Each structure stands twice: as C-alpha cells, then as structure tokens.
Amino acid sequence: MQNLSRRGCGISVSRATVLTLGAVALGLFFAARAATAQQPRKVPRIGFLSSVPANSMPARVEAFRLGLRELGLVEGQTITIDWRWAEGRDDQLPGLAEELVRLQLDVIVTHGTPATFAARRATATIPIVIASADDPVATGLVESLARPGGNITGLTLISLDLSGKRVEMLKEVIPRLRRLAVLWNPRNPSSVRDLKETQVAARALGLQVQSLAVADPAGFAGAFSAMTRQRANGLIVNSDAMFTGRHALIVDHAMKSRLPAIFSTREFTEAGGLMSYGPNVADLWRRSATYVDKILKGAKPADLPVEQPTRFELVVNLKTAKALALTIPPSVMVRADQVIQ
C-alpha cells in the first residue's frame, strides 16, 4: 500500500507539473502574439527624383498618386514619399540621389534620363522605377526592354514613327511650310535618334531642316534668333526632360518669334504652344505605380519588362492658332483628343 501510494503521488505531481508548464507556454504564446500585434507595421518608403522644377508638371504627379491610391498605397497613410526636385539643375541630381539613398528607401522612382543615371550611380541595390524617360536601352540604363537586368525598370517614352508623324501634322497645318527648325538636345541619345527620323520625314515632304542643338537653357535665346535669321516657318521640339521642365520658356520664345510649333507633350500646348502629339505621359506615371506595388510585394526590377506607351494624344490650342493667323484643318481637328479654346 505504501508503494502504491508513492506511485500515486508521483503521477499526481507529474500531471501538475505538465499543466503548469502548459499554462506558462500558452501564456507566453499569447503574450508574444499580443506584442507582435502592438508593433506598428513598417510603412514602405518611396523616393522620387526629377531634374525639373517641382511645380512644372502637377498633372503627372497627381496621376502617379492616383495610381498608387488605386493599389491601396496612400501617401501619408500606407506609404511615405520623399520628393526631390533638382529645379532644372542637373548638377544637383547626384547629391539629391545620394540623399535619397541614405534614407534607406524601399524603391526610388525617377523622371527623365539624367535623374535615372544619378539614381543608378548612387545605388546598385535599391530598386529604381522609371516613371518616364527616353529610350533606356539606347542610353545604356537597361540591357533590353524585355529583360532590363540590374535594379532598373519602368516605362519609356519611345515609340516608332512619332517624329515623322509630327512633321506630317505640322505640314498639314502649314501648307506653305518650307524650312523646318528642329530643337534637340545633343546630350540625349534619344533626341539624336528623333532628329534623324525628323530629317528623313522632312526630306520626303520636300522640306529643309534647320538643326538646332541646345544642351543648356542658356542656348534657347540663340537658337530662336538663328531660326529667325534663317527664316524658319515651322518648329519641332524633340522630347527631352530638360525641354519639358522649361516648357513655358520655350513656348514664350516660339510665340515671340511667331513660329508655329509642334511639341512632344501636352505641357507645351497648355502653356500656349500650338499643338502637341505624343504619349500620354500622365498615363505612364499612373502605370509606374504598378511597378512600385510589385516591387514592394517582392518582385525584382530585373524580372519586370520595361513598358512602352499604349496611349497617345493630340492636343490643339485654337487660341494660339488664332494668334498666329492659322486655321487648323478639319483633318487635324477630327483627330484631336483635346482642343484648347
């Protein structure tokens, strides 16, 4: 009886110990879950870098924010965005890019080729999404559109035959067009390509081309003086971030020279230029938000193909046409996506 009693006590003590240990473990489990639940989730941090002035393209910025919101990424709530604008000074881009890298961002969004180069030089590890830029293959930013490689992907402005179509449209509006001035940036490989396409299209229409290379804003005044001296009667302004950031200045020069011009983006037409034809850049910026979302969810830039434009727009400013004593033909008006009265 005594031995049985001891064995019984042993069983009783063992069960108590097990129950006690189980209760402690369960308590630790729930305490750990509670502590984890109380810890705030890391809010993704996005950087943005552009060479242009901060207030030069509000529609594009809003399109980018809209694209993010559509994916549940709300600035100030579910994400933070650190904006950096070089205010038209490309020499400021390297320092701004390094400043962003020090913030330990999850992704950097760039506008334009110079800003993208600055970001790439500053980091080889933080993913970089191009909101819009000229041909990233020609400039060496990515290996190919289908397989970018490295830490860069996004959207490009390149599309075939745009330069030729601008020449044809301007000829429709100015039947007496004989001498076509072309403003282009020699530092931009895509602008060099656009110049060649423009020259081919102009020759096919019997036009003379006056090539005016401008690599710095200080060159605009001299370029427009040369147009006047050589009696250009039409102007094409090639796609370039430096030009877009100074659209109001370029339009002002064109109007003072009474020179009908066609541009690559709507910012120029909204600032008083005659007409613009090119990609819907706001749509590109909105679509760039999908790249940000995918990367935040674990995708690698090298595996995300660079996309080309899918939407194009023709914008015509009738007020400017009237000021230049021009009549926009019905063949152009019927194709216009927007008419500014």
Image (cartoon, rainbow, N blue to C red):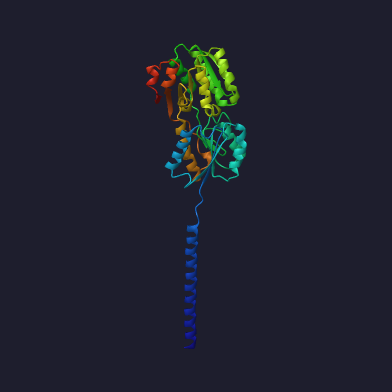
Q: Residue furthest bottom?
A: 1
**How far across and how far down the image is residue 260, in percent?**
48, 17
Is residue 270 placed above or below 116 in the rendered structure? Answer: above
Please indicate whether residue 330 sits to the left or right of residue 210 in the image.
left
Front-most of residues 72 and 338: 338
Residue 215 seen in render:
no
Is residue 11 placed above or below 331 in the rendered structure? Answer: below
**How far across and how far down the image is residue 146, in percent?**
51, 34
**How far across and how far down the image is residue 67, in percent?**
44, 39
Residue displayed at 47% across by 64% down: 30
Q: Quadrant of the C terminus?
A: top left
Front-most of residues 265 and 224: 224
Q: Quadrant of residue 187?
A: top right
**How far across and how far down the image is residue 204, in percent?**
49, 13
Residue displayed at 47% across by 70% down: 23
Residue displayed at 38% across by 18% down: 331
Residue 182 seen in render:
yes
Residue displayed at 49% across by 69% down: 24
Is residue 249 placed above or below 45 in the rendered structure? Answer: above
